[in-house]
Amino acid sequence: AQKITQTQPGMFVQEKEAVTLDCTYDTSDPSYGLFWYKQPSSGEMIFLIYQGSYDQQNATEGRYSLNFQKARKSANLVISASQLGDSAMYFCAMRIQTGANNLFFGTGTRLTVIP
Amino acid sequence: DTEVTQTPKHLVMGMTNKKSLKCEQHMGHRAMYWYKQKAKKPPELMFVYSYEKLSINESVPSRFSPECPNSSLLNLHLHALQPEDSALYLCASRPLGGVNEKLFFGSGTQLSVL
């Protein structure tokens, strides 16, 4: 069975500082993808970054980077230079090759950026 | 056009009403999804359509009836709902491919059942 764990229900960060949101996963499938989504209070799920299980380098997208440690089965999101607009729920999600239609979500972390 | 459009944005209905949620995308995606999200919880998968055919039904009660009339449109028909069905209903789509294909989400329909 697949499992995604986000152990931080809430996080606070000072504006302009960096913050790391934790995500661990469990799967026996060797081919999988890991995603991070942001959900502001408006409700829309916004894609941030993707990491594939066979990718050799950590993914980066602007201020977002993914600290992928395959042996530890962790895929932490790092947000640099936090902005007030980064305040939102953040979900880690995983898709495996077998049954690729499903996307499993973690429980989420609420990030609050403090001015 | 890289949007998934959901209507209505808000819906209030009684337990005896029949209503429908609509989702539309024009990105040529052949997989479309319905998720249900309760407050402060992650989205829960309800249904997946691949090539306009239902491929996943996560044991959803029959009072929720999905329909995919064409490759751009996805509906969710609602009948005899319960107050506990009040939630945010999210539609999503993606190209059919490997594990790297991200889901594009709509902004959701906030449903209240009275």
Image (spheres, rainbow, N blue to C red):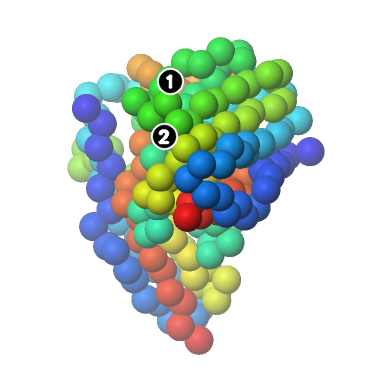
Amino acid type at circle 1 is Ile
Q: Which chain does tag 2 point to?
A: B
The residue positioned farthest toward the bottom in the image shown: A115
Q: In this view, does A8 lie above or below B4?
A: below
Q: Count residues near mark 1 (Cα–Cα under 10 Å), then give few for <14, some for 14-19, many for 20+.
A: some
Q: Count residues near mark 2 (Cα–Cα under 10 Å), then give few for <14, some for 14-19, many for 20+.
A: many
Numbered disc 1: secondary structure: strand
Point out residue A97 in the picture as x, y percentages from the top left corner: 39, 20
Q: Quadrant of residue B26?
A: top right
Numbered disc 2: secondary structure: strand
Whether tag 1 and tag 2 are in contact, CB under 8 A, the answer is yes
Q: Is residue B88 above or below residue B105?
A: below
The residue positioned farthest toward the right in the image shown: B1
Q: In this view, does A14 lie above or below B79?
A: below
Q: Mark 1 points at which residue?
A: B56
Q: Mark 2 points at which residue?
A: B45
- In the image, what residue occupies the spot 40% across and 77% down? A13
Q: Is residue B22 above or below residue A48?
A: above
Point out residue A89 in the picture as x, y percentages from the top left corner: 44, 61
- In the image, what residue occupies the spot 62% across and 30% down? B75
Point out residue A46 in the picture as x, y percentages from the top left corner: 56, 51
Q: Quadrant of the N terminus of chain A?
A: top left
- In the image, what residue occupies the spot 56% across and 13% down? B53
Q: Which chain does tag 1 point to?
A: B
